[in-house]
Image (cartoon, grey):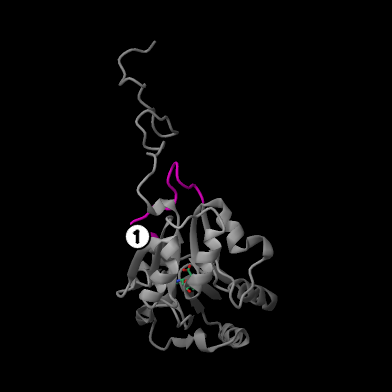
Amino acid sequence: MVDFVGAGPGAADLITVRGRRLIREADCIIYAGSLVNDELLKDAGEGCLIYNSAKMHLEEVLEVMERMEAQGKRTVRLHTGDPSLYGAIREQMDALRARGIPFSVCPGVSSFCGAAAALEAEYTLPGVSQSVIITRMEGRTAVPEREKLHMLAGHGATMILFLSSAMADRVQEELLQGAYTQDTPCAVVYRATWADEKVIRGTVGELCKLTADNGITGQALIVVGDVLGGDYELSRLYDRHFTTAYREGEPPHGGGTTS
Ligand code: SAH
């Protein structure tokens, strides 16, 4: 059995309760050494084999999983954040399926959620944006033509860019080709939830300078959008006059008459 586990964004106590239990029960852990907090490995049982996947290619990872399975052992594949985002788990799951090795996936707190906490931000604000675009600048991994950054930028929605802080100049240029302006608020969140977390706020017009001045070249997210600004509308959900499945809204003028 292989359990894919989301390790969370950094702080060791941001793994799920289930994820921690799976680590404790594992006979073998293959962890993404570049961004997973190795404090999490302290929970591993005595004799648990530990591999750092940063130094391995796919076949080597699969070979370890197969070997463990043949011995009836449990492997935890520990991925940073939530494994569904830029985690390269699909290829592992498909290979396991092809080999008849059972697996499960345990979600984790993605770094974009860690960044929201660091920013004390709500990504979806009434009257501002009701969508979050999670994307990346094209690098060595190609981005499909219809998802090019300047096209997604046309929506002006809240946007989170993974894997892109080293290319802030190109990000800035493409964002400005869309609906964002020089003055649209943005932030760079470096190592969200780690002890050395850094939150840098500014505008899209200064994005490139913000990363350069702070020496940010990786392990950071770029967050863009007016949700980082001051204006928004109050929610309907908690409006005293709004009726929901759980709560009867008050009449418009404070009650009293029913006519
Ligand atoms: N599955 C992960 C993302 C893996 S891709 C998740 O859900 O968070 C690796 C990229 O994620 C990094 O280049 C960086 O852009 C971002 N990242 C991961 N952890 C981060 C953190 N703690 N703070 C800021 N960005 C982070």
**Farthest residue in the top direction?**
259
Quadrant placement of the C terminus: top left
Q: Which residues are magenta?
A: 116-131
- Horizontal and vertical percent position of residue 173: 53, 65
Q: Main secondary structure of the magenta part?
A: loop
Please tell me which residue is depicted at 45% across the width and 65% down the height of the picture. 222
Q: Is residue 109 left or right of residue 118?
A: right
Is the CB of mark 1 within 8 Å of ligand 1? no
Residue 110 visible in the snapshot = no
- Horizontal and vertical percent position of residue 221: 44, 68
Quadrant placement of the N terminus: bottom right
Q: Is residue 252 left or right of residue 158?
A: left
- Numbered disc total: 1
Give amino acid for label 1.
Leu
Q: Residues within 10 Å of mark 1 (few under 14, many from 20)?
A: some
- Horizontal and vertical percent position of residue 33: 45, 83
User: Is 188 in front, or is 248?
Assistant: 188
Please tell me which residue is depicted at 43% across the width and 66% down the height of the picture. 207
Residue annotated with mark 1: 119
User: Is 75 in front, or is 228?
Assistant: 228
User: Is 100 in front, or is 124?
Assistant: 124
Residue 31 painted magenta: no
Residue 96 visible in the snapshot = yes
- Horizontal and vertical percent position of residue 53: 51, 84
Q: Secondary structure at mark 1?
A: helix
Please tell me which residue is depicted at 44% across the width and 61% down the height of the picture. 204
177 w.r.t. 126: above or below? below
Locate residue 217: give its quadrant.
Answer: bottom left
